[in-house]
Amino acid sequence: MIKRENIKQAIDAISQRDPEIGYSLNEMLGTGQIDVSSISEDPSQGDDLHFFFNKEKIPINKFLFFNEGTVPLEQGLVIKYGEMTKKQELLKEEDSIDYLQAAKVIRKAGLKFMVIHEIDYAIKCLRRNPVMPETNTDLENDNHNGEIRAPSDERLVSLLEEIKQDTKPLEIPGKGDDPAVLFQGVINGATPAYFVRFPFRMDSLMQIADMNLEFFHVRFLLNCLARGLEKNLFVCLADGKILGLVYLALKEHMFIRGLEIKYIATLRGKTGDQTGASAKVPRGAGAFLVAGVWLLLKAGPANIREIILDSEIGARGFYEAAGFQSRGLSEYVLKVPKGRLLKAIIIMANNLKDLGESAVSEIKVIIEKQIKGLRKKPKNEKKISARKLTIDSVKECLKADAHPELAGTAMGMLMKYNKKIPESEELIQFASEYGSDETKAHIICNRYLLS
């Protein structure tokens, strides 16, 4: 439960950065306009904590509160203060108000107000005490013998000032040749999605401010930028919206270097959403992000050989279904991608013009094993579900835009085990309808030889 002492600490922190805002919030706390739940309320309801601002219930992510202290409270208070200021401005200027439109304008104003507040704080910190990363976790500076070159403080300050003036919406990346797009795939079945580095824009930071995710908040992202670690941040972007983020680091285990998924969170998977809004968010951002990480690993240095993460209990089912295996008490390592993760990898691979030999060879081996596994009859609902996902992955290999080597491997295995896999004829028929000309020719040739 959040206490008044916690709110007071947050307001004191805000006051150090902006005395005027702190004074107003302190007055509101004193008059009860800012308040907390009574002791009689059940603090265990829901995953998120909350406080009240003018009787409006403001959710606070429990994970962030316990791990970041007053930071989520500070940001929530500043957002509501910005909203209040905008509301007062609209009431003075407008005779007739479109309340639905006004609500959107007020919300955006609050988010932008908080982002600018945090940017100003980051600029002050940079000018007072330029920060340097404590350890070498930057993925692109791995060959610098543990040293990371400090970015120019003035360059960073200029970038932050530019972000404050940025009014453009977050653009949807172009297809194919857009250098910002690392990998392209789909989520929710057919929605185009892009694996890109976090775009430091006003719109993107406002989206993060509005998400209330675990791990990721505006100050964390700005700290990554200040420390030169912004290239470790990646997002799932669809229709101009950020649907999930992942932060990577390098980690060594038993003399084996691995790519660690340090933090990962998706809008659909966020905790504490009691409104049901998460049900409207497209599915698949989590698998999409991990697929992007897998392809990064295959395209990276040969001495980085595995993907690892520390999994919370609630997420272990997702990771085990994707092919992660436990190692130690909480660490998981990705052995062989499967299920939705494998499908996401194949879709991304099909969209790459230059899929490296390492990735091609490994995906081919995985496809062969998955198709061989279809010879076994599933014995329970879990295995039936897994079988359907395998068939979906094979279909991705048989489409017209599939990578030629992946399509050839899938067709070869289906022809080889035609009589042992019940779905083989269905899959071959799918390929004859939706496959490339080369795949169709392969089918015709084999049927001619067998006739």
Image (cartoon, rainbow, N blue to C red):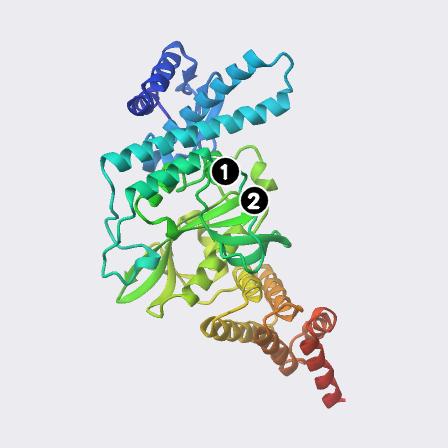
Question: Residue 28 appears in which quarter of the rendering?
Answer: top left
Q: Do we see residue 262 in this rendering?
A: no
Q: Which residue is mark 1?
A: 203
Are the residues flagged by discs 2 and 1 in contact, CB closer than 8 Å?
Answer: yes
Mark 2 / mark 1, whichever is N-terminal: 1
Check disc 2 and give the amino acid type. Answer: Gly
Q: In the figure, is residue 345 to the left or right of 16?
A: right
- Examine the rendered structure and indicate whether residue 178 appears above or below residue 203: below
Give 37 or 294, whichever is nearer the viewer. 294
- Examine the rendered structure and indicate whether residue 19 appears above or below residue 185: above
* Residue that appears at 56% across and 32% down: 275
Under circle 1, the secondary element is helix
Q: Position of residue 298 (x, y in %)?
A: 43, 67
Q: Position of residue 405 (x, y in %)?
A: 57, 76
Q: Position of residue 431 (x, y in %)?
A: 70, 72
* Residue that appears at 37% across and 19% down: 21
Q: In the figure, is residue 224 to the left or right of 317?
A: left
Disc assigned to residue 299: none
The CA span between labels 2 and 1 is: 9 Å
Under circle 2, the secondary element is loop
Q: In the figure, is residue 176 to the left or right of 80?
A: right
Give 217 or 368, whichever is nearer the viewer. 217
Check disc 1 and give the amino acid type. Answer: Asp
The quadrant in which the N terminus is found is top left
- Could you classify mark 1 by the number of other residues whose Cα lies within 10 Å: few (under 14), some (14-19), or many (20 or more)? many
- Could you classify mark 2 by the number of other residues whose Cα lies within 10 Å: few (under 14), some (14-19), or many (20 or more)? some
* Residue that appears at 50% across and 75% down: 365
Q: Which residue is mark 2?
A: 240
Give 410 or 319, whichever is nearer the viewer. 410
Q: Position of residue 238 (x, y in %)?
A: 57, 48
